[in-house]
Amino acid sequence: MATQTFNNFIDGHWVPSAGGRVFENRNPADRDDLIGVFQESTPEDADAALAAARRAYVTWRLVPAPKRAEILFRAAQIIAERKEQFARDMTREMGKVLEETRGDVQEAIDMTYFMAGEGRRQYGQTVPSELRDKFAMSVRQPLGVCSAITPWNFPMAIPSWKIAPALVCGNTVVLKPASLTPLSAINFCNVLAEAGVPRGVVNLVTGGPEVGTRLSTHEDVAVVSFTGSSTVGRLVNQNAASGFKKVHLEMGGKNVIIVMDDAQLELAVEGCVWGGFGTSGQRCTAASRVVVHEKVYEAFVEQFVRRTRALRVGNGLDEGVQVGPVVSEGQLETVMKYVAIGLGEGARLVTGGHRLESGAYAHGYFHEPTIFADVEPSMRIAQEEIFGPVVSVMRCRSLDEAIAIGNDVPYGLSASIYSRDVNAAFVAMRDLYTGIVYVNAPTIGAEVHLPFGGTKATGNGHREAGTAALDVFSEWKSIYVDFSGRLQRAQIDTQDL
């Protein structure tokens, strides 16, 4: 069968890169499976996409928000109809198991429906003026052209988090998806075009860092929304700063699950298995740290190891597989490097620790689900984001100590506590310095109608999802209407009752 070539989407047309170069996209579970050939775009391609977005903005911003929302609603319906096809495409290019890719596509459906609803709910404020015969109100206004730079681990959900709110607010978009997972982003943009998004309103260019740099520095860009590593996010922020662009950053995490001595232990173990090894640990919200009260520590580790060893690793398209490959050779090397670091630091390897490379694993990037016990909070494996199937387990003697360990990392995305003590749960909710807290649930599982994001090195204060996303992609305009027929000076002129 002939290899399919996928193009960039610029000004409503699928076009090849001006540079003529392409790259291959292969299945991380089976490198012999060539998914397609994609454009290795140039800064010139990014310029063309940005020019198209700038032209389209002139008319798109004037389309009433409820009409923009109707297009998003149709897009959500189309994605729902093709959910299984899109999920299978995603498993082939990204590796996570089919059950999870269905969830990824569902999240795009949910977000697109949610933001369609916001077409009639972009509420402002009306307030009484301090002067007579004067009306005061505020409204949202779009910003212009938005750059969206998205990662490979949620290759349809995260583009939807950025594009749907940007569009409903009246902006236009240029998307650069991760080169490891371009097909899922192409599927999403195809749907938007089919649903009726006008030419130039959404554009897509595939490629590497040069394209990302142009999208974060070009003078036509008003907003840069980036999800990825803290290292790259810092560069994006620096690149955009000189142009006074609005920048939204969603970056790394080193998330903690706290298991107290009164926890329902079996439930906590199930949560740690799902939180630590779902998506092969390749989530910014993955539970890569577990802090367990010393009274239940040994029992927890024994059950956690037993459940982890029972996980079935393999091709995510195969029935019964629970853990897929990591996404690339580079990511696999990173995981193996940190396993070696953990051993060198003196942590106790209690299960896993090896690459899987024989038999059915020979052509993929597979690694055993791995647990280190007796980890010290200062160890690198407990401080640095690994982004793979490696979990560090630590002891604590009290709730206060557990919370202190939880907060003592550079990141602050998600945290969890397992406890049947409502008072302890509320203390943890208050004192864990993260953007998301779960009680008796793992650190993954955010829903689209609440804000998503973190503190410290995880982000820069903005939030995705929920109505908070509208604040990233719009600005406030305050409007005063004086119908007195005379000059009135606020804070100066006073009037009798």
Image: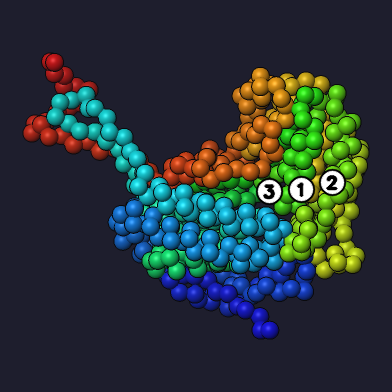
Q: Quadrant of the C terminus?
A: top left
Instruction: Give left or right: position of 414 versus 198.
Output: right
Q: Nearer the viewer, residue 289 or 209?
A: 289
**Residue to which mark 1 is pinned:** 277
Residue at (41% x, 49% y) in the render: 117
* Secondary structure found at label 2: helix
The residue lying at 42 percent from left, 55 percent from top is: 167
Seen in the picture, residue 333 relative to 397 is either above or below; the reply is: below
Please name which of the two marks, 1 or 3, marks the residue nearer to the observer: 1
The residue pinned by badge 3 equals: 283
The answer to whether residue 326 is above or below residue 125 is below
User: Would you say the residues marked 2 and 1 are in contact, meaning their CB atoms lie under 8 Å apart?
Assistant: yes
Q: CA distance from mark 1 to mark 3?
A: 9 Å
Given the image, on which type of amino acid does mark 2 rest? Thr
Three-letter amino acid code of the residue under disc 1: Phe
Residue found at x 85% / y 27%: 296
Q: Which residue is mark 2?
A: 308
